[in-house]
Image: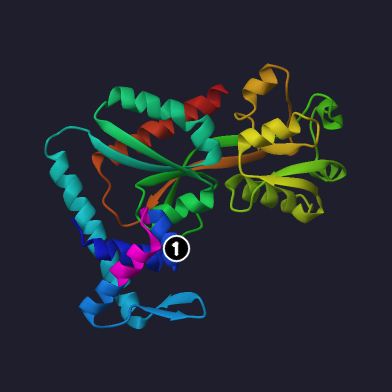
Amino acid sequence: MADRRLQVFHAVAKHLSFTKAAEALFMTQPAVTFQIRQLEEHFNTRLFDRAHGRIALTPAGQVALDYAERILGLSSELDTRLKELSGQVAGPLLIGASTTIAEFLLPQVLGEFKARYPAVVPRLFVANSEAVQGRIAERSLDLGFIEGDSHLPSLVTDVCCDDELRVVCAPSHPLAKLESVVPKALMEHAYVSREPGSGTREVVDNYLQKAGVQPDSLQVVMELGSPEALKGLVATGLGFTIMSRAIAALEVKLGRLVQIPLAPPLIRHLSVVYPKERFHSRLVNGFVQFAKERLAAMQAAA
């Protein structure tokens, strides 16, 4: 119901990039530029300063952003409240999830929720934790599941459950013979890491630093954005990786990989994040509660 130009402006203002806003809104860059130009003509003022390939909000643009966030929030709340008068839990549910959670934990949760509420249409956006938080902040997603906590002040973080990360390697790897691994011992072996921006990467780097091991002192032989690719690579014996024990559970059971606990253990939070100061529908609230209970139960049973 909100003016499309305001939605486009909000995305550009959050990303400070026409290209990234276009990607987030599934529009072409010329279409985004046209919408912004129309809005600037409507208000008869510049909303962005454009110089040296970068953009920044003008004072008028900052005022417009404050109002745009309130208008878009109220518009979404109006749509939701009117739909809920029917008493039916239905409609789209826009979810973001980091790769680990989306591939190994969330499918079961979504399947069970869909079976309970057939009229709900979940849509899942999969990326690393940083990208998921960006989409939620710009209001193109209702909520998201990430590893660790959010660092964005505009988002609320609720912890769902704990998740243990372990060293994972091939059965033939020297580390496979150990009952546990201290961080300093990892420096002696080739390491296959997650990509920058990954929640797993951030958690592992913080853990190593607290243990007195600088992440750049490890023998990083490759950085990958896919947990499946990580498992396939370390199964060849090339090196070790560090990942959630839930990810490699099947391969460990089949004897293709080995998991070794870190000493001290590496435990992180899996969290759900959503915007502050925003009305949340019965559908969103219901799914958050359902997902938190199911994820906690799944991790406890792992």
Q: Nearer the viewer, residue 148 or 249?
A: 249
Magenta region's main secondary structure?
helix
Q: Which residue is drawn at 55% across and 42% down?
A: 269
Q: Residue at x 39, y 30 (%)?
A: 110
Rendering quarter of residue 243: top right
Q: Residue at x 31, y 80 (%)?
A: 60
Image location (x, y in percent) of residue 158: 44, 45
- Where is mark 1, residue-wise? 19
Q: Nearer the viewer, residue 264 or 131?
A: 131
Residue 87 drawn above or below residue 125: above
Image location (x, y in percent) of residue 195: 64, 49
Q: Is residue 175 left or right of residue 273?
A: right
The verdict on residue 22 being magenta is no
What amino acid does circle 1 point to?
Thr
Q: Give the range drawn in magenta.
A: 25-36
Image location (x, y in percent) of residue 140: 35, 52
Rendering quarter of residue 229: top right
Local crowd at mark 1 within 10 Å, few (<14), some, or many (≥20)? some
